[in-house]
Image: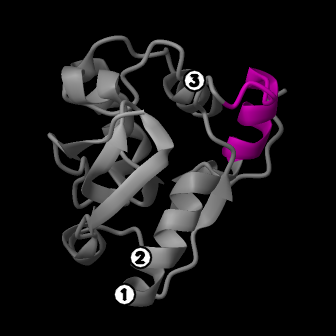
Amino acid sequence: MTLSKADHSFGAFYDKNSTILILGSFPSVKSREQGFYYGHPSNRFWKVIAFIFQRKEPVTIEEKQALLRTCHIALYDVIDSCMIAGSADSSITDVKLTDLSPILSTSSIGERIFVNGKTAYNLYMKYQYPIYHITPTCLPSTSAANARWRLDDLIRDWRIITGSDVKWL
């Protein structure tokens, strides 16, 4: 695998009404090409969010942004730039962090931080936790690479972000 320098080519998505922050590790190649989060068609993020909030699954970036606003979700990643081989989180080195302080200081997130997968969790705990001292809730990755988690399993575990114990399935 050949490592190359990659930068987070789009910023955080949030507004003052955001109450939930979901962090990934670093955008995939497809997401960087599209200029928005979870751009690979096999990533189940948008299916999961739409289902647990009982909304239509978004297709365009504008629809995705509208869904996030409606659900008061902020999205960002732990890493701003790094050396990486393609989209392989396991290859990440030479990490430069994202700055979460603008999101945390201008929104209503408080301590409602969730991470999308164990890699994002481990990176957050190593690099971001010493700064912000907020322990995130680790959710199973929505990536297709996490094939052992079926969509129903993801939905079951991800519904915690709604703050409700309602069982949708």
Q: CA distance from mark 1 to mark 3?
A: 30 Å
Do the CB atoms of the residues marked 2 and 1 lie less than 8 Å apart?
A: yes
Q: CA distance from mark 2 to mark 3?
A: 26 Å
Residue 67 drawn in magenta: no
Q: Is residue 77 left or right of residue 16?
A: right
Q: CA distance from mark 2 to mark 1?
A: 8 Å
Q: Could you tell me if residue 104 is visible in this image?
A: yes
Residue receiving disc 1? 131
Q: Main secondary structure of the magenta part?
A: helix
Q: Earlier in the sequence, mark 2 or mark 3?
A: 3
| Secondary structure category for the residue under label 2 | helix
- Magenta stretch: give its range: 146-159
- The residue lying at 79 percent from left, 23 percent from top is 150
Type of amino acid under label 3? Arg
Q: Give coordinates of residue 114: x percent, y percent.
A: 55, 59
Q: Quadrant of the N terminus?
A: top left
